[in-house]
Amino acid sequence: MNILEKQPPTCYNLNMNVLISVGILILAMLIMAFLQITPGVFALSYHYAIGKYSKKKASRLMLFFIIGVEIITACVLLSVYYLISILCFGNFQPETSILTWIMIGILFAFSILSAFYYYRRGNSTKLYIPRKFARALDSSAKSIKTNSDAFVLGVISIACELLFILPLFIVSAIELMRLDLHSIPINLLAILLTLAPLFPLFIIHYKFQAGYNLANILKSRSKNKSFNRVILSLSYLIIAVLIICFKVNLQ
């Protein structure tokens, strides 16, 4: 009887841990879907491609841009996942390490950075990257001619966001390992995680196909600037709080 009485809390803790891990992964996907450098470069590239080539060729070029984004995202996530697997050496207890608190501090820092420094001051949608580099991206978007050009630009654009994405991948890799320990299939979640940066690209592609132009898209980006800033900042903050409350204090 005593054994049976102890089972429900255990099951509850297990279910709660799974839900929190999935919640953290969803928040990580949300952040990646709201980052703005890659969608901005994609919109510029599509605009210039439509102006120079047929719609069919422009769509093909943008497909290779998307492939470049997806490949580098998947490679970075897999690299982080296997690196953490090697470092754990089969003794998976990241919550006991000072590195966990360092990661929590980094997430809090990115919450502040997202709120105050992700966008430059003013009414424009200029982002934190140096202006010289932004002009280089614009020049590259104008000069796309081949599928390889589009692919490389996709890789470069998502690489510019790695500063904000890498902490998410570290946290996500740890949560995927936790779910794997609970015999939860993690393949679908990992795939969705790598697809998250593509969601805004598909939306922009749809808008161009529906007759929107670059001016419409830039106006929408400007209108949503404050909302994006809030989503990014709150999501980083909530991930940090969830790790403190459910991954550290309850161990």
Image: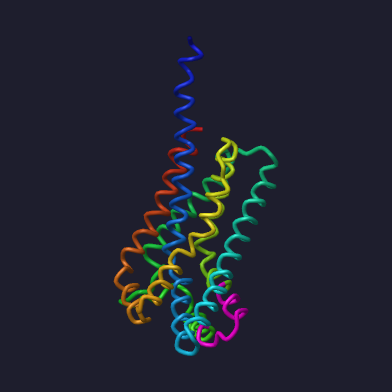
Tell which of 167 and 179 is nearer to you.
179
Residue at x-position 49% and y-position 55%: 106
Q: Is residue 213 visible?
A: yes
| Most frequent secondary structure within the magenta stretch | helix
Residue at x-position 49% and y-position 25%: 10
How many numbered circles does the render carry?
0
Residue 190: x and y in percent read 55, 52
Q: In the rendered structure, does residue 150 fall within the stretch colored magenta?
A: yes
Tell which of 236 and 191 is nearer to you.
191
- 180 up-or-down from 139: above or below: above
- 91 up-or-down from 233: above or below: above
Q: Tell me which corner region of the image, top left, top right, bottom left or bottom right, holds residue 178.
A: top right
Residue 165: x and y in percent read 52, 60
Specify the segment rendered in magenta: 141-154
Residue at x-position 41% and y-position 45%: 241
Residue 167: x and y in percent read 53, 56
